[in-house]
Image: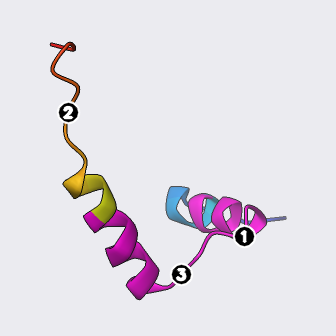
Amino acid sequence: MEKQKSQSDKFKEAARELEADQSEERWEKRLKKVLKSKPDPRRP
């Protein structure tokens, strides 16, 4: 009988299948890029 996977295990498996990047340095770069972007003044 196969043991059911936890939600975190399912997430990790999906991330691997999508070839998600695990580099903390790249994460920081992407996060800073998002934080630098200005909100659109026309949107509430």
Q: Nearer the viewer, residue 7 or 16?
A: 16
Which amino acid type is shown beneath numbered disc 3? Gln
What mark, if any, has residue 39 been given in the picture? 2
Q: Is residue 15 visible?
A: yes
> How far is disc 2 from disc 3 in space, using C-alphas?
28 Å
The secondary structure type at the circle numbered 2 is: loop
x and y percentages locating residue 8 in the rendered image: 51, 63
In the rendered image, the vertical position of residue 29 relative to residue 5, given as above or below: below
Lateral position of residue 36 relative to residue 4, left or right? left
Q: Nearer the viewer, residue 4 or 21?
A: 21
Q: Please identify, in this view, whether the residue under mark 2 or under mark 3 is nearer the observer.
A: 2
Prevailing secondary structure of the magenta residues: helix
> How far is disc 2 from disc 1 in space, using C-alphas?
30 Å
Residue at 21 percent of width and 55 percent of height = 35
Q: Which residues are magenta?
A: 11-32
Residues marked 1 and 3 touching at CB (< 8 Å)? no
Q: Please identify, in this view, whether the residue under mark 2 or under mark 1 is nearer the observer.
A: 2
Residue at 72 percent of width and 70 percent of height = 19
Quadrant location of the C terminus in the rendered image:
top left
In the rendered image, the vertical position of residue 6 relative to residue 19, given as above or below: above
